[in-house]
Amino acid sequence: MTARIANADLVFIHISDLHFRAAGVDDVHDQDRYLRNELQLDLRRLRTRLPRVDGLIISGDIAFGGKAEEYAFATNWIESIREQLGCERRGVMVSGGNHDVDHDAIPDDGPVDLIHQEVRGSATLEEYDACLAAVLRHEKRGESLLYPLGAFNAFASSYGCGFNRDCPYWERDFSLSDGTILRFRGISTILLSSSRDNIRSHKMLYGGSQRTMLRIPNVRYAIIGHHPPSWSIEDDVADQVFSALSFLQIFGHKHEQWITTIGNSVRVIAGALHPSRAESNWLPRYGALAISARDARHLNLRIYPRRWSAEELTFIGDYNSEGKDYRDYVLVVDERK
């Protein structure tokens, strides 16, 4: 069963985990060229069911090794998708993933690694927050911590999604039809990322500044990041904050798609567009999000998950047990004041 949205306040395409490599991308030996071509063909099909597209969300791992040449290719590819979708540059929103970190800039026991070790030596979440904040407040040490993210940050800044030690996240506002604001916050989940990343021993750290969202009348928050809370040192604390203060959470990293309702928030963990073919559950995915104000206290959210068909060698709708290739949610937001 397919359905077309006659109208929606805002529509976004969501892609994650591109993994563009410095060598071999888009040459004749690049098998992912076929995936990208099929993506563009499927976007044309999906576009007929959407009133328009307002933006493109990419939730991390744009590159493979955090190198400038990888972002040069990524920029050209993203611009071709953006032009096909007909959305403005301000509609492109990106967050960084662990593959967007230049590990060559983090030698063992070098300046950056020593900062990582210092922060990770904290015993409590309060200590983690205080230590990370102290590093970022210090000009030299803060710049050192962000140095391995330089190529990504330059790329992201071209879309207004860069960050710095004074503010490790970015925000962007869109207007909803009832006069309220949809505010995306793009969080940096990779401030402590390195080759040592491990979900048991070396998790990510968001930090207190990124978990702090002020309740503002008529502002509806949505989160864009790469690593979900289960991959963070904050874990349940971040889970609670994001689920209580935002109606939509968009993540990547896991290469498996999960759409779950947590409290009054929907969490979308994207599948990868370019998962490694060595993965046992190799299944490229992407999706679309349509958001509308329903009334003063509710938002409508429709998600179109798309998946690769090994039989047809193309992207198709991801149908549920009700025969629908979309998921609908009605979410309560704070009453306007």
Image (spheres, rainbow, N blue to C red):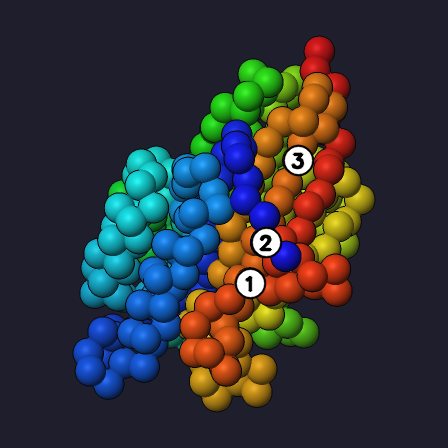
Q: Nearer the viewer, mark 2 or mark 3?
A: 2
* Crowd rating for badge 2 (residues with CA inside 10 Å; few <14, some 14–19, many 20+): few
The residue drawn where x is 31% and y is 36% is 88
In the picture, the disc for residue 300 is 3
Q: Nearer the viewer, mark 3 or mark 1?
A: 1
In the picture, the disc for residue 317 is 1
The residue drawn where x is 42% and y is 48% is 47
Is 226 left, or right, of 23 in this rendering?
A: right
For the residues bearing labels 2 and 3, Cβ distance under 8 angstroms: no
Is 101 left, or right, of 267 in this rendering?
A: left
Look at the numbered disc 1 and give the secondary structure of its residue.
strand
Q: Quadrant of the C terminus?
A: top right
The residue at which mark 2 appears reads as 2
- Which percent across, then down, holds residue 309? 51, 76
Look at the numbered disc 2 and give the secondary structure of its residue.
loop
The residue drawn where x is 50% and y is 82% is 311
For the residues bearing labels 2 and 1, Cβ distance under 8 angstroms: yes
Which amino acid type corresponds to the residue marked 1 in the rendered image?
A: Gly
Q: CA distance from mark 3 to mark 1?
A: 20 Å
When asked about the image quadrant of residue 2, the answer is: bottom right
Residue 66 appearing in the image: yes
Give the answer, above or below, for where 18 lies relative to 268. Answer: below
* Crowd rating for badge 3 (residues with CA inside 10 Å; few <14, some 14–19, many 20+): some
